[in-house]
Amino acid sequence: MDKSSLTVFAEFHAKPGSEQSLGELLKGLIEPTRKEQGCLRYDLHVDNDKPGHFLFFENWVSMALLQAHLGSPHLTALQSQSAGLVAEPPRIVFASRIG
């Protein structure tokens, strides 16, 4: 992976009692996303101390291909499917590797 790839961190916090449901919903994004053009890495993590805190670590070839991902059917469906499961809107960070 070269330094020109785009890195994304996406953070989700489940409402109390919704940890398992949100986790399953997010896991369902992995397979279709990894098949998308431009996806270099798409890994879901859970905070060891907070089971309702989920983080995606992603690498994309370009912003244009990431934008295509953001408009994909499985990702646009996430908004409505996760509405009652998240405690707050997801936090998304776009980053560039510098070292």
Image (cartoon, rainbow, N blue to C red):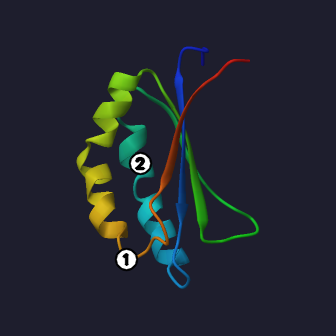
Q: Cβ–Cβ below 8 Å for labels 2 and 1?
A: no
Above or below 56: residue 4: above
Q: Which amino acid lies under the numbered mark 2 shown in the image of this protein? A: Glu
Report which residue position mark 2 lands on: 31
Crowd band around label 2 with a 10 angstrom C-alpha radius: few (<14), some (14–19), many (20+) = few
Report which residue position mark 1 lands on: 84
Above or below 45: residue 5: above
Q: Which mark is residue 51?
A: none
For the point 40% across and 53% down, the residue is 29
Crowd band around label 1 with a 10 angstrom C-alpha radius: few (<14), some (14–19), many (20+) = few
Q: Quadrant of residue 28?
A: bottom left
Residue 76 rendering spot, x and y as whole percentages? 27, 52
Q: Quadrant of residue 11?
A: bottom right
Above or below 88: residue 91: above
For the point 26% across and 41% down, the residue is 71
Tell which of 43 and 70 is nearer to you.
70
For the point 35% across and 46% down, the residue is 32
Q: Which amino acid lies under the numbered mark 1 shown in the image of this protein? A: Gly
Q: Earlier in the sequence, mark 2 or mark 1?
A: 2
Residue 60 rendering spot, x and y as whole percentages? 47, 28
Q: Is residue 27 left or right of residue 70?
A: right
